[in-house]
Image: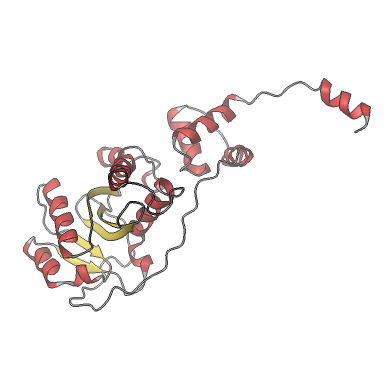
Amino acid sequence: MPRATYYRWAREPVKHPSVLEQTIVAVCKLTNYRYGHRKIKALLEQTYELAANRNTVQRIMKKHHLQCRIKPKRKWKSQGESIVIAPDLLKRDFTASRPNKKWVTDITYIQYGGTTKYLSTIIDLFNNEIVAYKLYDHQQTPLVIDTLRMALESRNNPEGIIIHSDQGSVYTSYAFQDFVKRKHLTSSMSRRGNCWDNAVIESFHSNLKSEEFQYVKFNSLSDYEVRERVNNYLTYYNEERIQEKLGYLTPIKYGVA
């Protein structure tokens, strides 16, 4: 290296990170690196009253390698022979003008403990709130019936709700469809093999795995640890995780706004 270059470098003042840069790094750490630059920008304005251009936030995050975690693509698998098929009443309209108008539900597997767990979840499309969930050792019909029963009880047993699911055998079973009918609800189903018809809950389950379990190896946790992680994440999702669809509010805050 030429001597002149070295001395020119040595004479340059040390550049300390700005308040904005320090805050962005702190917010990313506080949110466990789950947010992209748009949500970080929204949090800066809401919580810290710091206005910043979206590209500036993105540049600083890129500088510190703070990009959010990427969701793995999910391959569709056949759910087996169907029994009762309901029409698709949502037709990808994932909005609701009031609570308890449209609920979406699905099952995903959790393979990070000693045994495979199956998570059944119900989301209210009014504010994307997790209304109820169950984590069982099996994915049989009682899992989805118990989840729906819990959701109804938590909302004082409303009637007339559209319950949208895929065409999995537990949802097309006579037992589940009979429970839906007896509770005065309306069943709706995605087209076979089309995950986009139930995109909201598919996205939620993908977020759960990419944000909470991305760096966890399969079968590396105890079943208790898996259950604690799921419980904590679902509480975080309802009470702390902001969403662009909700004007960068959490589901709970949007529901009472």
Q: Position of residue 121 (x, y in %)?
A: 25, 54
Relative to residue 144, is residue 59 drawn left or right? Answer: right
Quadrant location, the C terminus: top left
Residue for point 48% across, 40% down? 33
Q: Answer above or below: position of 137 versus 241.
A: below
Residue 22 at least partly seen = yes
Relative to residue 39, is residue 99 drawn left or right? Answer: left
Quadrant location, the N terminus: top right
Q: Answer above or below: position of 211 versus 163.
A: above
Task: Say which quarter of the image contains residue 83.
Answer: bottom left
Residue for point 36% across, 61% down? 199
Q: Position of residue 80 (x, y in %)?
A: 27, 76
Residue for point 35% across, 73% down? 193
Q: Position of residue 85 (x, y in %)?
A: 21, 75
Q: Answer above or below: position of 117 versus 57.
A: below
Q: Position of residue 73 (x, y in %)?
A: 46, 62
Residue for point 46% across, 48% down? 215
Q: Residue furthest left?
A: 182
User: Is residue 149 or residue 197 the one in the foreground?
Assistant: 149
